[in-house]
Amino acid sequence: MRRLSLRGADLVLMARHPRWKGVGLSRNTLLIVECDGPIAAERITRALDRFLDVCPWPAARLRRRFPWGKLHWAAGSRETLTRPPVRRAVLASRAHLATELISELDTRIDPHREAPLRIVLLDAPPGPGPAGSFVVLTWFHPLMDARGGQNLLAHLSHLDQHEGETLWNGGPPAFVPERDRRSLRERGRIAGRSLKYMRTLAPVPPVSPAAALVPPGRTQFRHESFAAADPAADRRATREITWRLAVVGKAMAELWHRRGLPQVPFLLPISVDLRPKGEPGPVFGNSLAFHFARFLPSDASDVPALARALRQQMADAVRDGQIEANEVAMEFLQYRPLSRMLSVLPWTAGGELFSFNCADLGEWPPAVEHCFGRHVLNAYHVPVVPPRPGLGVFFNRCGRRNNLVVSWLEGVLSEEEAVRIIEIVREGMGWIRAR
């Protein structure tokens, strides 16, 4: 297979930027993996070469045959594929890690002319302290989601570990999702339900803190790791996205009040992973559907009550088939120009999409506890947030470390405001700073 059509969620990611066409905004996502020792770059390049023998998409290019045709990844024969670049650098100090990562976020990938993936090895500075390495995967976000990035690293690590052996015990896994086998008529009927729902979703358009930001600034982020203050109290309830969203909502309500922003309902998309539970699932394509959470800033004053209300919203969406309908409807964007993909949503006319972004990227997979011969100490994701809303809060867990990332565009938040958001979330989750 030499052509891979973009999925609906990939197209939505593409459609969030055309309004700011001349600004040169990045669509990058990072996966940062901290290892307990230096990694030989040759191990990564060999694994990449072996991966490209069976799967071309990390070296593909984005194409559209006609203005009205499908956006797709195109790859030539194996002999024509160019391995994605692998670069090595030594950090001047640990404090320079964030600087290097911001540079990776802001250095745009042009998927029409270059590979949609690149890898950087950042070595710890010489001198006292641990001599570790950071493996940084940077990719064009519509290529794959965060889980896909983890799966890709797991495959590369597997190929490195089993060098010279048969790939994947005789046959590669499915790297891309299966096609929907339902008829066009059936899918059209389901998508129609989603369109009807989406048009009535936000009678009052949402407001984001990036509303007055023209043009958008550079990407900024802050990452901190935490541990549960009482491991026995690290309950399932606090790990649910509804609780985490309620805690983030409390932080955002405070920001809205401080900024004097209108007290209109918050609206934000919550991604739902479509991969089968208990299986790695596909790598490429954003295998996501979306649920849309809605609540007033004033609702966030009572976090447990808000978490219950958000859980009920999600249960109702599953019962009514809204999440499935949204997934099917996104696939019908394939023949629309990017600039018109979101025009069916009335609340986007003024430029706003959502109030803020929030996602829980889940547990770091056990399959990647070791990476290219080294033990993984920590791993987390940092995405570039779109110009609207220009702000996002992201969770994941690696071993006993709870990672929290606040990502924003310069001018949307101050550093002090980002610190305050993290502190409110830390308190709401019952975390302490990890050593």
Image (spheres, rainbow, N blue to C red):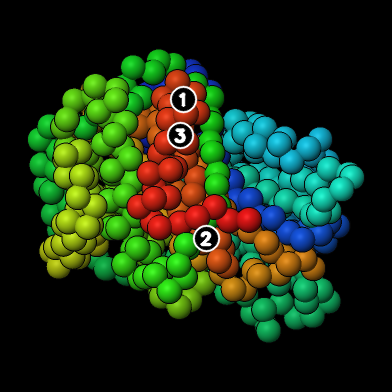
Pinpoint residue 163: horizontal percent, then vertical percent.
Answer: 81, 74
Pinpoint residue 424: horizontal percent, then vertical percent.
Answer: 38, 44
Q: Are marks 2 and 3 in contact (CB under 8 Å)?
A: no
What is the crowding at mark 2: few (fewer than 14 residues within 10 Å), some, or many (at least 20)? many
Q: In the rendering, which numbered label is found on residue 72?
A: none
Q: Amino acid at mark 2?
A: Ala
Q: Are marks 2 and 1 in contact (CB under 8 Å)?
A: no
Question: Where on the picture, by quarter, is residue 234?
Answer: bottom left
Q: Quadrant of the C terminus?
A: bottom right
Furthest toward the bottom, the residue is 169
Pinpoint residue 257: horizontal percent, then vertical percent.
Answer: 25, 28
Report, in whole angstroms, how far the alpha carbon at label 2 lies from the one at label 3. 19 Å
Report, in whole angstroms, how far the alpha carbon at label 2 lies from the one at label 1. 26 Å
What is the crowding at mark 1: few (fewer than 14 residues within 10 Å), some, or many (at least 20)? few
The answer to whether residue 284 is visible is no
Is 79 placed left or right of 384 in the picture? right
Q: Secondary structure at mark 3?
A: helix
Q: Secondary structure at mark 1?
A: loop
Pinpoint residue 341: horizontal percent, then vertical percent.
Answer: 30, 36
Q: Residue at x 61, y 61 (%)?
A: 152
Q: Amino acid at mark 3?
A: Ala
Q: In the rendering, which numbered label is found on residue 418?
A: 3
Q: Quick check: 205 above or below 323?
A: above
Nearer to us of marks 2 and 3 is 2
Reading the image, the residue beneath label 1 is 414
What is the crowding at mark 3: few (fewer than 14 residues within 10 Å), some, or many (at least 20)? many
Q: Who comes first in sequence, dot 2 or dot 3?
A: 2
Q: Are marks 3 and 1 in contact (CB under 8 Å)?
A: yes
Reading the image, the residue beneath label 2 is 227
The answer to whether residue 260 is visible is yes
Q: Residue at x 54, y 38 (%)?
A: 222
